């Protein structure tokens, strides 16, 4: 028997942001291999499937990618519908290519089902477009993290070259990110936002400037977060500052 493997994007967290195709496949799945960030409500849609956790979180125990690849191949030889459920979109920082290569080498049919990536979810939560006429025409998606044994990547080059930058998996490296970007010529006054748990009830948004990024990152919790950097955030930052000044004046008057 040779089944089919579906690399499915689970989106940023909220189950109702799944595509119709993703929801349908979960309902038909025989087995689901899921990431650590997939919401329980999303997994519940796979009512008849065997569910296997293969998640990766920075600083925690993670399933080896080669082992995941083998499990997918083995499952496809026993089941008709195998779903590999990934947070966000499979094709963006999701190691999808490694799994696609393994499936192709084994002669297993596959299909990729896109999902809403964290950058788009964070932009929506902020109410700020990542692009803006006359302000931002280029956007870069980067991560400063590299797996053990991998060469360092020049992520800062892309950030400094783009009008808007979204940094994935960077909250825990905020000191390094701030120091590196300032040293590479990005102004410390550049607006920045950290968005945690976008689309979920526990979401948190903190706005500030690049020079304040280490402090901002310490204000959020342990949920998945993205950093957005660029002038598209200027208006939102100035609005927040004005609001805070009004609150301070009101408090001073009450005293």
Image: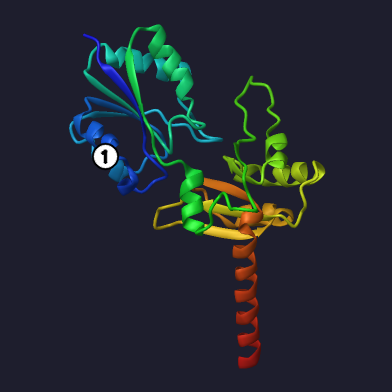
All told, the count of numbered labels is: 1
Q: Position of residue 117 (x, y in %)?
A: 46, 41
Q: Position of residue 87 (x, y in %)?
A: 42, 37
Colour scheme in the image?
A: rainbow
- Along the viewing direction, whichever of 65 and 116 lies nearer the viewer: 116
Residue 64 seen in the current view: no
- Residue 170, quarter of picture: top right
Residue in the image at 34% along x and 23% along y: 111
Q: Dot 1: within a 10 Å radius of its alpha carbon, few (fewer than 14), some, or many (20 or more) residues?
A: few
- Residue 254, quarter of picture: bottom right
Q: Is residue 99 above or below residue 193?
A: above
In the displayed structure image, the side of residue 179 where residue 112 appears, left or right: left
Residue in the image at 29% along x and 16% along y: 75
Q: Element type at marker 1?
A: helix
Residue in the image at 61% along x and 36% along y: 143
Residue 135 seen in the current view: yes
Residue in the image at 24% along x and 41% along y: 44
Q: Position of residue 188 (x, y in %)?
A: 76, 54
- Along the viewing direction, whichever of 207 and 187 lies nearer the viewer: 187
Q: Position of residue 164 (x, y in %)?
A: 63, 47
Q: Is residue 26 above or below residue 106?
A: below
Q: Which residue is mark 1?
A: 20
In the displayed structure image, the side of residue 136 where residue 60 appears, left or right: left
Could you tell me which quadrant the C terminus lies in?
bottom right
- Residue 72, quarter of picture: top left
**Which residue of the protein is positioned furthest toward the front in this rendering?**
134
Could you tell me which quadrant the N terminus lies in?
top left
């Amino acid at each position: 028997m040779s089944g089919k493997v579906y690399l499915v994007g689970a989106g940023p967290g909220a189950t109702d942001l799944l595509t119709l195709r993703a929801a349908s496949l979960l309902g038909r799945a025989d087995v689901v291999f899921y990431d650590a960030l997939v919401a329980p409500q999303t997994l519940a849609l796979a009512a008849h499937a065997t569910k296997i956790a293969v998640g990766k979180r920075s600083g925690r125990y993670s399933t080896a990618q080669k082992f995941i690849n083998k499990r997918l191949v083995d499952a496809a030889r026993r089941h008709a519908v195998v779903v590999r459920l990934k947070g966000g979109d499979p094709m963006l920082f999701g190691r999808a290519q490694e799994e696609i290569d393994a499936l192709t080498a084994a002669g297993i049919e596959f299909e990729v089902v896109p999902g809403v990536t964290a950058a788009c979810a964070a932009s929506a939560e902020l109410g700020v477009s990542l692009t803006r006429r006359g302000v931002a025409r280029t956007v870069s998606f980067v991560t400063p993290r590299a797996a053990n044994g991998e060469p360092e990547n020049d992520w800062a080059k892309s950030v400094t070259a783009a009008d808007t930058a979204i940094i994935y998996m960077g909250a825990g490296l905020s000191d390094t990110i701030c120091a590196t970007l300032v040293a590479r010529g990005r102004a410390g006054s550049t607006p920045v936002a950290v968005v945690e748990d976008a689309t979920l009830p526990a979401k948190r948004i903190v706005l500030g400037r690049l020079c304040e990024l280490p402090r901002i990152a310490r204000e959020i919790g342990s949920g998945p977060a993205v950093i957005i950097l660029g002038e598209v955030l200027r208006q939102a930052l100035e609005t927040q500052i004005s609001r805070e000044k009004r609150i301070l004046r009101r408090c001073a008057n009450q005293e």
